[in-house]
Image (cartoon, helix red, strand yellow):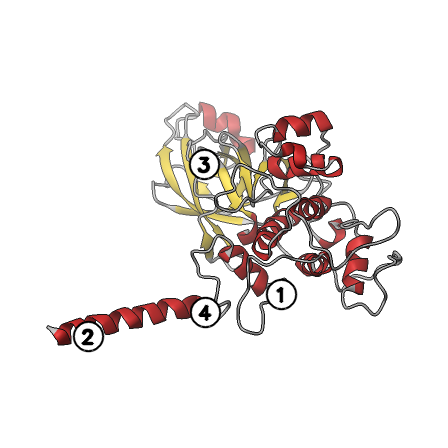
Amino acid sequence: MKKIFKLFAMLICIALMSFNSAWADTFNDLPPSHWAYEAVEYLYENGVVVGYPDGSYKADNNVTRAEFCSMVVSALRLREKNIDSTRNFKDVEDWYWAYNDIQLASFFDLVVGTPDGYFYPTNTVSRVEVLSVVLNSLSTNDMTQEEALSILAKYPDANEVPLWGLVKTAKAVQNGLMYNTPGHEHTLEPNRPATRGEVAMFLYNMMAQVSIRPSEKLADKQRPVIKDGYVVENAYFDGDEIVIPAGTILPLGVMECINVQKAKPGDPFVARALVNFVDKDRLLLIPIGTQFSGKVVKTKKPLRFFRNAYIALQTESVLDKDGNVVGPALATLGQKEPEIRLIRGCPHLTKVRYYGTRTQKMWIHKSQRVDFVLQEPLRIKILENQFIQD
């Protein structure tokens, strides 16, 4: 019995060691169960945050204004950007370790100093200051103070938000950029110093959305504005996801000819975005050339004398440039089996075939537009979005 118990205990130890090794290689105080784990891991992999010499991250530690500037500049990849002007802060000399990062963040209108010319780089950065920087990096709709007060009314400490940060805090809540640690979900705590874990969450959300709707000054570093494209009017943002509601029509081009008389359920096909899909602000959602694999789900062969052929297609997966499946990002696309306008093989023989005795040969031609309808909301996780192309 003792041998069995020892063996069991040994197996438990091995299992725990294996579990620990899964995350200890990065930070030894940040297990996968931690609320900031995913954000910190992502930022670490992208060179935005670093740990301490002892291998820890110390998620509960505070962050200085200078340290936060450094993180923001890294997150937005601004260090290779040349700036044509600098701002003189009385307490930030050109030899200071964060001088360049503070200048970059200031040039791109992400941070500001005090009216009397100070920056206070060693002061801790507050939660409302972090939210201000996050909102400064984005292009958002206008909001009045009255609208902001209405949005924040559900928080008992909304009156603690400084007037200068009122609208930005409300926009952060409205756009899913606010983060409250477990146990503090119903408060804003705007003036409390932000912790390293909270900063990681805020920056993680910022990086997701700035790739889609950057501020005007950041636009040349991020997602371009597309002048010509198919406007998806009802697309909106929910945290780090783009949401296109159910019922939205997305026109795609089917990339091979499909003969309705010969097609049968289960036959594969590939569709392609023939245009850029953009939101109402002309920011890119799905770029031209994105491919989707799918299958035929229903067919109805035409009868003699009648133009009643029918075929329904359903997409299943999004493909990369080499044709490999990269995810079911558009798995629900087309499930309503919309009716499709079909074109005859030879438009010049329309009358002959319509009035003749032979069954019409109905086709979907290569690159012909087919309107797919979303049966369920389409959610695209921005940080993992294969549509975003450098």
- Residue on which disc 1 sits: 47
User: Which amino acid lies under the numbered mark 4 shown in the image of this protein?
Assistant: Ala
User: Which amino acid lies under the numbered mark 2 shown in the image of this protein?
Assistant: Lys
- Residue on which disc 2 sits: 6
Residue 290 position (above or below residue 173): below
Q: Along the polypeptide, which appears first: circle 1 or circle 2?
A: 2
Characterize the local packing of mark 3: few (<14), some (14-19) or many (20 or more) Cα atoms within 10 angstroms.
many
Label 1–label 4 contact, CB within 8 A: no
Front of the two marks 1 and 2: 2
- Residue on which disc 3 sits: 334
Front of the two marks 1 and 3: 1
Can residue 61 be seen here? The reply is: yes
Residue furthest left in the image: 1
Q: Along the polypeptide, which appears first: circle 1 or circle 4?
A: 4
Identify the residue at horizontal 70%, vertical 25% (top origin). Answer: 146
Q: Along the polypeptide, which appears first: circle 2 or circle 4?
A: 2
- Residue on which disc 4 sits: 24
Whole-angstrom CA distance, mark 4 to mark 3, is: 44 Å
Characterize the local packing of mark 4: few (<14), some (14-19) or many (20 or more) Cα atoms within 10 angstroms.
some
Identify the residue at horizontal 69%, vertical 55% (top origin). Answer: 124
Label 1–label 3 contact, CB within 8 A: no
